[in-house]
């Protein structure tokens, strides 16, 4: 089995969006679209299950990141903080 190499702990800010659905068309997995338009797929864990409830909300998330051979980024979330977007007035 190949070892998965995670990089240093990072903190990102972005919107929680769905990226994978089950056979009932319910969201199965989420990713975080960061402010610089990078997509971080959230690794399956208790934290990822919690994040399913907060689709389309702004979040700060910390964790370790890895990148697959196709350049897709995956975040193993250790902590997250929900926030509200700044007012547009």
Image (cartoon, rainbow, N blue to C red):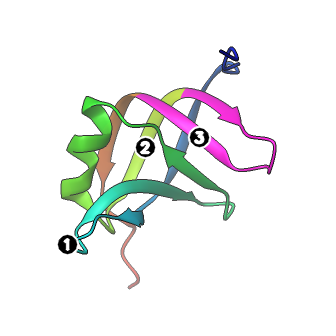
In primary-sequence order, the first of circles 2 and 3 is 2
Residue in the foreground of this view, choosing between 50 and 20: 20
Residue at horizontal 63 percent and vertical 31 percent from the top: 65
Which quadrant of the figure has residue 36?
Answer: bottom right
Q: CA distance from mark 2 to mark 1?
A: 29 Å
Q: Are marks 1 and 3 in contact (CB under 8 Å)?
A: no
Q: Position of residue 33 (x, y in %)?
A: 54, 61
Instruction: Kindly state the secondary structure of the residue where label 1 is placed.
Output: loop
Instruction: Please tell me how crowded label 3 is: few (under 14), some (14-19), or many (20+) other residues with Cα within 10 Å.
Output: many
Residue at horizontal 51 percent and vertical 49 percent from the top: 13
Instruction: Please tell me how crowded label 2 is: few (under 14), some (14-19), or many (20+) other residues with Cα within 10 Å.
Output: some
Residue at horizontal 70 percent and vertical 50 percent from the top: 72
Asked if the magenta segment contains residue 49, the reply would be no
Residue in the foreground of this view, choosing between 17 and 35: 17
Q: Using the image, tell me which numbered label, if any, was put on residue 82.
A: none
Q: Position of residue 42 (x, y in %)?
A: 46, 43
Instruction: Please tell me how crowded label 1 is: few (under 14), some (14-19), or many (20+) other residues with Cα within 10 Å.
Output: few
**Which range of residues does the magenta coloring cover?**
64-77
- Secondary structure mostly seen in magenta is strand
Asked if the magenta segment contains residue 70, the reply would be yes
Which quadrant of the figure has residue 88?
Answer: bottom left
Q: Using the image, tell me which numbered label, if any, was put on residue 74.
A: 3
Residue annotated with mark 2: 60
Residue annotated with mark 1: 24
Which quadrant of the figure has residue 85?
Answer: bottom left
* Residue 10 sits above or below residue 41 on the image: above
């Amino acid at each position: 089995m190949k070892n998965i190499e995670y990089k240093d702990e990072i903190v990102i800010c972005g919107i929680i969006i769905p990226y994978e659905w089950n056979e009932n068309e319910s969201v199965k997995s989420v990713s975080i679209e960061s402010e610089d338009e990078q997509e971080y797929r959230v690794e399956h864990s208790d934290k990822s299950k919690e994040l399913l409830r907060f689709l389309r909300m702004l979040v700060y998330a910390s964790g370790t990141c890895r990148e697959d051979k196709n350049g897709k980024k995956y975040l193993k979330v250790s902590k997250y903080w929900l926030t509200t977007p700044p007012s547009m007035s």
